[in-house]
Image (spheres, helix red, strand yellow):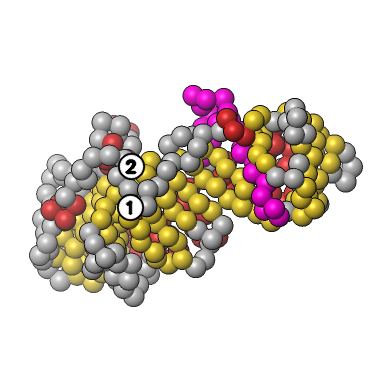
Amino acid sequence: MKFVASSTALLSHLQAVSRVINSKNTMAILDNFLFQIEGSSLKITASDLETTMITSMEIVDAEGEGSVAVTAKLLLDTLREFPEQPLTFEIDDENLAMVIYSENGQYNFIGQNGDDYPLLPAMPESAKSITMDVATLNDGIQSTFFAAGDDELRPVMMGIYFDLTPEAMTVVATDAHKLVRFQNSEARSEEAYSFILAKKPANMLRNILPKESGEVLIRFDDKNICFILPTYTLYARQIEGRYPNYNAVIPMNNPYKVIVDRATLLNAVKRVSVFSNQGTSLIKLHIENDQIVISAQDIDFSISAEESLRCQYEGEPLSIGFKSSFLIDIIGNLASESIILELSDPSRAGIFMPFEQAEKENVLMLLMPMLLNN
């Protein structure tokens, strides 16, 4: 087999799929990329058994067809040092010896039999499917990803929940302290379906979706999910289990509403949080007379900070505490110049929303409060 490919184009595709490969694999073959030459196309696959990503790129002067597994680290480390130039790959069909010819040299690899690479998950004809804009899927994952949990004792929270209905697509992530709900009324399914996408494939989609355009086809059965994009295809194992009833934890009829500039609040919280207790990271918001007073203290080190900023607020004086790192996460991931904070009392969750929602979209973020001593 033989083909010629652009060094930078090949590196770009390899870097995108290489995020699938674990540092320690149960099977040695998974330390490799699978190269499959079909006509003038090179298909590249990387897998860890749970997640598999495939991409294709155009090649020239291709001779022969077949597959070979190539050591991922060695190939990536070599390609990173090349300026843009055509590289010629020659693979011996007998012993799988591979030679890469550049403008000034040659590099020798030993490949492995491509037939030893794990097969893709079989997606039955009965698999359910939905098509949506790439931008819609990207918005849903980007909005919710940061809120997914890391607690292995609650595996269903270690992923992003997709709730598909004839009315809308709802994407949810929570770690029991914070929750994000993203809804889009254009991405609808004919029937009610749901699945939980693990954080690793979700993170891979976060990296490739901004580079894609057009539509994405999502196919899924009881075990696997497949995202088919113009340039990439991603297979992922579903997280099994029942997702919590997210609507039940969102407080309704919150009587107190605050409207505030997002960047001003975010920067103030970041500054004041430096002075919060290292153990609790507690930060206090006192809201009264169109003003938010943000304060924190660490009695052990005799340090404290307080900052005031203007807001729109009509209601009784109210104080509520939040974990500063969670609060920074929430405010930092809201895409709006101004945000709305809805509250009911210091013991119930605060609701954060963009002041201006995108058309046909609704983003809601919830943050559980912390107990205040005074």
Q: Using the image, tell me which numbered label, if any, was put on residue 197.
A: none
Q: Residue at x 11, y 49 (%)?
A: 347
Residue in the foreground of this view, choosing between 147 and 263? 147
Measured as percent of width and height from the top left, residue 359 is found at 34, 75
Measured as percent of width and height from the top left, residue 101 is found at 84, 41
Q: CA distance from mark 1 to mark 2?
A: 13 Å
- Secondary structure of the residue carrying tag 1 is loop
Residue holding disc 2: 223
Residue in the foreground of this view, choosing between 222 and 10? 222
Q: Using the image, tell me which numbered label, if any, was put on residue 126.
A: 1
Vertical order, 196 against 151 (above or below): below
Q: Residue at x 57, y 25 (%)?
A: 28
In the rendered structure, does residue 156 fall within the stretch colored magenta?
Answer: no
**Residue 158 lies in what quarter of the image?**
top left
**Image quarter of the N terminus:** top right
224 sits left or right of 24 in the view: left
The stretch in magenta equals 20-42
